[in-house]
Image: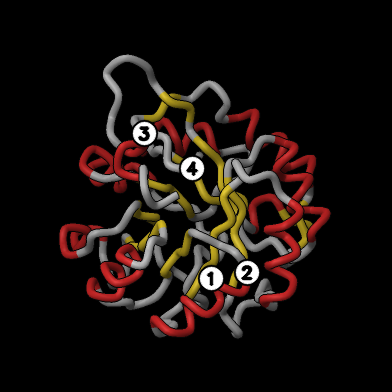
Amino acid sequence: MSGDELKRAAPSMEKRESVQVKICGLTRVEEAVACAEAGAAAVGCVFYAKSPRCVSATTARAIRRALPPEVACVGVFVDEPYEGIMALAARTGFSAVQLHGSESPELVRRLRRAGLFVIKALFADRAPGIETASQYSASAYLVECGQGALPGGNAHAWEWGRAAALGQRHPLILAGGLTPENAAQAVRAALPDAIDVSSGVETGPGRKDIRKVEQLIAAVATAGARRRLFA
């Protein structure tokens, strides 16, 4: 995902890409496979000890091996040092990472130089804010509100349209409080290239309701995007 990422992310004047769906917080191989079969373009595995969705490198590696190569596997980190991220990437086979804390622009640059596709999380209601995007050189930006106790979206719906301006300039992944019932509304408001959903398609932390995944993907199936982020 590193060599051609900028080419894939460039806006196309000839055709519109479809909004892609990333299902995050996978903890079971069979559920990851079912998400892929339902049409998810990417899945995320969380490597943050305080998260109820945290998985081991062994589980993440099994998920990666069970999925077809065209489905991206994204490792989610919170303020993890460069060495720790690279070690887990090597153990799991993941070529994409999501930084969901207060990581520095230099860390983003180092990871990209190492060949990783780097998603940097920015927040509407706390630091690092949406307005700081120009300080980073991320492959894509994930935007959510930033409310709640944990670094993730904490199932909080918000004014998704606040992310729209960033999507005009950079590859945008929209997150935060998305469900099968409101995903189409959120996409119309923010015009993202992809959406990221975790708790909105769960029966419990880390356990995905595949029927909800299917409903979510169907809800945004006809939405257009500027860029294709995941192969």
Distance of mark 3 from mark 1, alpha carbons?
25 Å
> Is residue 158 placed above or below 146 in the rendered structure?
above
The answer to whether the residue labelled 4 contacts the one labelled 3, judged by CB atoms less than 8 Å apart, is no
Task: Kindly report the distance in space between the C-alpha atoms of the residues bearing marks 2 and 1.
Answer: 5 Å
Look at discs 3 and 1 and give the one toward the viewer: 1
Please count the marks in the image: 4
Question: Alpha carbon of mark 2 to alpha carbon of mark 4: how far?
Answer: 18 Å
Which class describes the residues within 10 Å of circle 3: few (<14), some (14-19), or many (20+)? many
Give how far across and how far down residue 64 sits, in percent.
Answer: 68, 58
Query: In the displayed structure, would residue 103 be above or below residue 60?
Result: below
As helix, strand or loop, the secondary structure at mark 1 comes to: helix
First along the sequence among labels 3 and 1: 1
User: Image quadrant of residue 12?
Assistant: top left
Marks 3/1 in contact by CB < 8 Å: the verdict is no
Q: Position of residue 45 (x, y in %)?
A: 62, 65
Image location (x, y in percent) of residue 213? 70, 42
Q: Are marks 2 and 1 in contact (CB under 8 Å)?
A: yes
Residue sitting at the far left: 134
Residue linked to disc 4 = 230
Residue 89 circle label: 1
Foreground tag (4 vs 1) = 1
User: Which residue is the site of mark 2?
Assistant: 92
